[in-house]
Image (cartoon, rainbow, N blue to C red):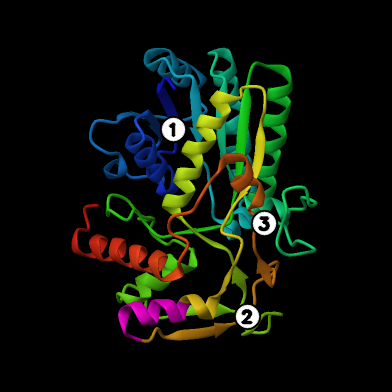
Amino acid sequence: MNKTSILVTGGAGYIGSHAVLALKDNGWNPVVIDNLVTGFRSAIPEGVSFIQGDIADIGLVGETIQKYNIKAAMHFAGSVVVPESVSDPLKYYHNNTSNTRALLEAIVKNNVHHFIFSSTAATYGIPDQIPVQEDMPKAPINPYGTSKLMTEHMLADVAAAHDFNYCALRYFNVAGADPKGRSGQSTAGATHLIKVAVEAALGKRESISIYGTDYNTEDGTGVRDYIHVSDLAAAHVIALEKLIEVPNISHTLNCGYGHGFSVSQVLDAVDRETNNKLVRKMEPRRVGDPDALISDNSKIKERFGWIPQYDDLSTIVRHALAWEQSLRDNPAK
């Protein structure tokens, strides 16, 4: 396969930077566009072309595509904090939906034929059954999930009208960091449980809140499907290869491990790794949080032959903790 240049929007962010590493490790040439509003210039590896700019700038995206002869794109740029989407919905419809529409216009105008989209399990809302399958009803309960679902609809329409195929990967709970310590989650004020827990374990937070202990789960706390960010990045590279190999087929696939851990189990795992005890604060459950959210990942395994390498909670926690320690020791990261 001719390994060409790949446009990566939001490649200075958490998941995008791991996709850049995975592309580079597999012989591709990633080209990053990021406005650095939430991303970090330091997350871009040496030797990777970087353009600071906005994906809504159709001219800039078009110039980048032409300059680097780009034929495929991975789209990570956007806003991802669910509670913020409820309080500021227009920001999410602007950043996630309107800006993606502009990006797709540049993509189509400049003959980019393959597109991988960072979607989310939030498109399902509160599912009627577990594990969640791709063809189950999509009923998002917040603007974040709706903004991503709207983009999925746009992609289907663009694929029907143009020489274009896509893969929308619906992420479950992404966690961990690059096993080699090259990247991790650096976002200040992050809301992801494992990130928050390792911050608390290292004294960056006084305690960690558990939102609800009366869920219909084994220990009463919410259960989620946690996927290592490097396994997720690997799935993007495989998706890219499949889109190029079979250019007339598009995919919408869950990306998770197919099993879950409760909040208490995750915090226990952090305690074991640090040989310490997190200070836990019990808070009321948040509106809209389902008891459990677990993927059915059989389709991505069957279609892509995706085999996770880091499907182990202790490993995910260990890698997240190592990255958090490196941030503490080197604040310039």
Tell us which disc is closer to us: 1 or 3: 3
Q: Main secondary structure of the magenta part?
A: helix
Tell us which disc is closer to us: 2 or 1: 1
Q: Earlier in the sequence, mark 2 or mark 3?
A: 2
Q: Quadrant of the N terminus?
A: top left
Q: Earlier in the sequence, mark 1 or mark 3?
A: 1
Dot 2: element: loop
Q: Residue tagged by mark 2?
A: 212
The residue carrying pointer 2 sits among few (fewer than 14), some (14 to 19) or many (20 or more) residues within 10 Å by Cα, namely some
Q: Indicate the amino acid at tag 2.
A: Gly
Q: Earlier in the sequence, mark 2 or mark 1?
A: 1
Q: Indicate the amino acid at tag 1.
A: Val
Q: Position of residue 263 (x, y in %)?
A: 54, 76
Q: In screen coordinates, is 332 left or right of 63?
A: left
Q: Are marks 2 and 3 in contact (CB under 8 Å)?
A: no
Label placed on residue 8: 1
Question: Magenta segment range?
Answer: 267-276
> Is residue 269 in the magenta section?
yes
Q: In screen coordinates, is 129 left or right of 194?
A: right
Q: Image point 46% across, 51% down: which residue?
A: 231
Indicate whether 35 appears above or below 293.
above
Dot 3: element: loop
In this orientation, which residue lies closer to the viewer: 315 or 122? 315
Cα separation between marks 2 and 3: 25 Å
In this orientation, which residue lies closer to the viewer: 233 or 285? 233
Q: Residue tagged by mark 3?
A: 296
Q: In screen coordinates, is 207 left or right of 212?
A: left
In this orientation, which residue lies closer to the viewer: 89 or 134? 134
Q: Position of residue 84 (x, y in %)?
A: 57, 56
Q: Image point 65% across, 83% down: which residue?
A: 218
> Is residue 189 in the magenta section?
no
Question: Residue reaching furthest left?
Answer: 329
